[in-house]
Amino acid sequence: MNPAKTEAILREHVRLCSDLHQLFIEEGQLMRSTGEPPSEEFLEKKKKFVGVLDKGLELLRMINESDEPVSPILSPLVKECRDKIMKLMIVDRENERLLLKCSLPPRMKEAYSKVAPGQVARAYGKFAK
């Protein structure tokens, strides 16, 4: 695959990751402000994004299946792609924690919010001996 086409695919991937990052940020803000899981309307918005990601994945597979290695000139762009994916994973993990917190029954929400960081680890440490 020629370097220009590879660069175009990688730039499109970075753009898709940026769009998805914004969507994840929006999801987290919604859960923080309302204290509720995302609405069906928002979930539909996320589902529409899956088709776009599938197309992007197919393009990335084309690069991977190519016999030619990626040009060293494109190394910064590849690194940018990896960095975007890591950011997505971090925001997604935080959103999963928010979703868990939002989905808990009211009496458990109180207990969840009263646990200090490290308190659970210390409790397990006492009983592990």
Image (spheres, grey):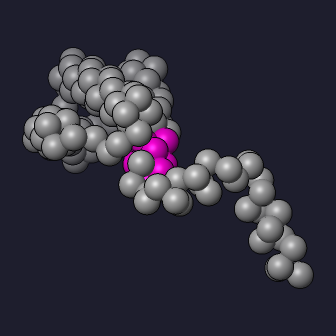
In this image, 74 relative to 51: left or right? right
Front position in the image: 97 or 78: 97
Task: Specify the quadrant that holds the N terminus.
Answer: top left
Give the farthest residue toward the front.
107
Quarter of the C terminus within the rendering: bottom right
Q: Of residues 14 and 59, which is closer to you in this image?
A: 14
Is 7 magenta? The answer is: no
Residue 47 seen in render: yes
Quarter-wise, where is residue 68 in the image? top left
Q: Is residue 7 left or right of residue 104?
A: left
Residue at point 21%, 40% (across, down): 39
State the image quarter where residue 3 is shown. top left
Q: Which quadrant holds residue 15?
A: top left
Q: From the viewer's perspective, is residue 124 above or below residue 48? A: below
Q: Position of residue 61 (x, y in %)?
A: 21, 45
Residues shaded magenta: 92-101
Left/right placement of residue 96 relative to residue 38 reads: right
Q: Position of residue 118 (x, y in %)?
A: 77, 53
Instruction: Kindly tell me whether residue 66 is visible in this rendering.
Output: no
Magenta residues, dominant SS class: helix
Is 95 within the magenta? yes
Count of numbered badges drawn on the protein: 0
* Residue at 68% over, 50% down: 114
Q: Residue at x 29, y 29 (%)?
A: 23
Residue 41, percent across and down? Answer: 14, 37
Is 42 rendered above or below residue 106? above
Instruction: Give how far across and how far down residue 112 sits, in percent.
Output: 59, 54
